[in-house]
Image (cartoon, helix red, strand yellow):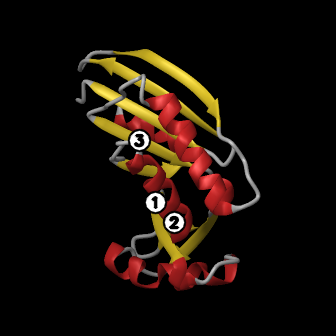
Amino acid sequence: MPKHVLGIALDTASITLVRLTGSLKSYDVTLAIQHPLPQHDEPQEQAALQRQALHTLLDPLRLHGDTILVALPAHSAVLRHLTFPFKEPRRIYQILKNSLDEHMPFDPEDVVADFHPLPSESKSAAQLLAVGMPEDVITTALGLLQEVGLEPTVLDLDVFGLANAALFG
């Protein structure tokens, strides 16, 4: 088990940081901060202001973590329950983006898609919770975090954060 886990919820208007420190038996919350991110009408100016705000917040904290979990806002993604007549992940990934196409306001070529299998009584069909998020949303978030020296281990949607933290811990 990691000794230090850093959780980051990156939303359009704020960043939330939670650091857990512990051992195999238990974790203690050693930091919990929510900080507003500046807003600007011009995307380049907003990115510069947000980088500056993150440096101001993070530099004095000298954050690190054996595991860095990042949650992106679900409002930037599309979530759908899909059924496929097969269960092989390789085959699912081959058609997942195109299967989400009718549900998304984005071009499938500009989307990162993933899925989580749901319980099913069928031996051959797969029930899935599928998600699609524009690559530029992910690239922007990762770039912002990498510029302040944080390299995420896991990238997830905010709606799945607590469930995955419970499974991870």
Compared with residue 8, is residue 110 higher up or lower down, i.e. above or below?
below
Q: Position of residue 94 (x, y in %)?
A: 40, 84
Q: Earlier in the sequence, mark 3 or mark 1?
A: 3
Q: Earlier in the sequence, mark 2 or mark 1?
A: 1
Compared with residue 108, is residue 21 higher up or lower down, i.e. above or below?
above
Q: Position of residue 101 (x, y in %)?
A: 62, 83
Q: Nearer the viewer, residue 118 or 75?
A: 75
The residue indicated by pointer 2 is 128
Label 2 crowd bin: few (<14), some (14–19), many (20+), radius 10 Å: many
Whether label 3 touches label 1, CB < 8 Å: no
Whether label 2 touches label 1, CB < 8 Å: yes
Q: Amino acid at mark 1?
A: His
Which label number is shown at residue 75? none
The residue indicated by pointer 3 is 69
Secondary structure found at label 1: strand
The residue indicated by pointer 1 is 116
